[in-house]
Image (cartoon, grey):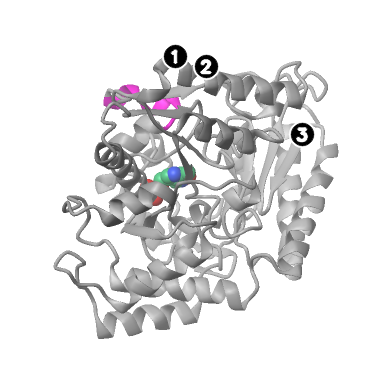
Amino acid sequence: MTELSNRTKFWQSQDAEHHLHPFTSHPGLRERGVRMITGAKGVYLEDSEGQKILDGMAGLWCAQIGYGNEEMVQAAAEAMRGLSYYNLFFMTSNPYATELAAKIAEKTPGDVNQVLFACSGSEAVDSAYKLVKYYWNLKGQPNRKQFIARERAYHGSTTVAASLSGLTGMHPQFDLPIEGIHHVGPTPHHYKFGGDLSEEEFCDQCVQAVEDKILEIGPENVAAFVGEPVMGAGGMMPPPEGYWPRIEALCRKYGILLWCDEVITGWGRTGEWFGSTYYGIQPDIITMAKGLSSGYQPISAVAMGGDIAREIAKSDDEMVHGFTYSGHPVACAVALKNIEIMEREGLVGTDAAKARIDYFRTQLETLADHPLVGQVRTVGLLGGIEIVKDKATKELFPDELDVGFKCREHCFGNGLVMRHVGNSMILCPPLVITHDEIDELVAKARLALDLTAKEIGVM
Ligand code: PMP
């Protein structure tokens, strides 16, 4: 490591004095010193020491169009100059919020056509949870207040969103989950949780577990089933073949709302505009954020269709919910420009986009021959690399080795952001990544795997 510059040291000490970071243990960070990201362009980040880093995570799964797009800067500046802020409370709207609501209705599957804005994925999730309760009250079925979610799901970190999340480590510090939330297992991902079952048998087991839970709670008490089309923060875990249509059928059978949390899978990530389309299902509710603005502004939305949309839109009640910054004009202008760029550049559903996804998949799959790699999986431009001790038995390295973390560190040290969740290495590059950049990403991932293998004495 070269001697750090004075400005980096200055920021590190300031940060250590005053700054609490999300999902971070502070003593370790403060001892080591935070890494300052000072710029970003295209698919690359730059740190305060001038190191260029290929961002294989699109920030936190969000920078669909990449960083530093000048058109986005112009759109933000124009909106800020013309209408820096106004609210939506006083029977008012602004052109950007209105046009964005219509655009979302156009892009979401089926009849999803009512849109409520918020600022983060977690706020969208909390909002959807409240709107589901409101809906069942409007329907005269106030008993329907139980929510079914999945083990290892991630839905955000506000009180409701963290409660819906099935990553149990998120709960004890905050006395969560709140009441009325049920996490079903097994986690619907065959490679890690299928044991000796075939994918088909495992799918049966997962679907049966959901039905059993519905019957245990009593179908008349169940408000909604919520799930990420592909589980993201829990470890990039696609469901077994056929899972989603069967879950949809269960929801219809028992009159339960189907809520897809598409904060990661929305906006082109799977190769379709929405992951629910990718899996051929029609949700009643979609929560979205991240790719909606490519992270250029904090904005999220709840989009609803079917009966919940109709009931809420026609109710004479005041809907007593919303935020100061719902439909913020600058955020909406930026999101509109982001979608325009995605359409114009053909980032979703075009031959070029499909070729990019194929190339990502085939190149990533070349890593399957690495001694540490048990599985390579992709959905669209989502990738997961499973690190195992034994490829045949899928035996894992002991937790103390923290092998995923070691690999992540080797990635960062060699100019690549690849995240880890336990033993899963996760990729989610910007949708604008080129074939050459994919080559660079895969080469750096292989180098990090080699260095990890050497460090733990496997190579
Ligand atoms: N839902 C899902 C599926 C997510 O992946 C995330 C964030 N990773 C959230 C909700 C929460 O979003 P935010 O961090 O913007 O609150």
Can you give x and y, in whole percent of width and height, for residue 348 in the image?
64, 65
Foreground pick, 13 / 66? 66
Percent coordinates x, y for residue 216 in the rendering? 44, 14
- The answer to if 233 sits in the magenta stretch is no
Amino acid type, label 3? Val
Q: Give the residue type that dot 2 points to.
A: Asp
Q: How many marks?
A: 3
- Give the structural element (helix, strand or loop) at label 1: helix
Query: CB of mark 2 within 8 Å of CB of mark 3?
Result: no
- Quarter of the image for residue 433 reads bottom right
Image-based side of 181 in relation to 185, left or right: left
Q: Around disc 1, counting alpha carbons within 10 Å, would you say few (fewer than 14), some (14 to 19), or many (20 or more)?
A: few
Callout 3 crowding tier (Cα within 10 Å): few <14, some 14–19, many ≥20: many
Pick the front one: 187 or 400: 187
Residue 112 x, y percent position in the rendering: 46, 56
The residue drawn where x is 39% and y is 38% is: 23
For badge 1, the amino acid type reads: Glu
Q: Which residue bears the numbered disc 1?
A: 216
Q: Mark 3 or 1, which is nearer the eye? A: 1
| Residue 166 visible somewhere in the drawing | no
Q: Is residue 220 left or right of residue 338?
A: left
Assess whether mark 2 and mark 1 are in contact (beta carbons under 8 angstroms).
yes
Q: With 121 as the anchor, is 174 left or right in this view?
A: left
The answer to whether residue 302 is visible is: yes
Residue named by callout 3:
373
> Residue 336 in the image: x percent, y percent?
44, 73
Judging from the image, what secondary structure is the residue with disc 2 in? Answer: helix
* Residue range of the region highlighted in magenta in the rendering: 165-174
Residue positioned 65% across, 22% down in the render: 193
Residue at screen point 31% across, 25% down: 176
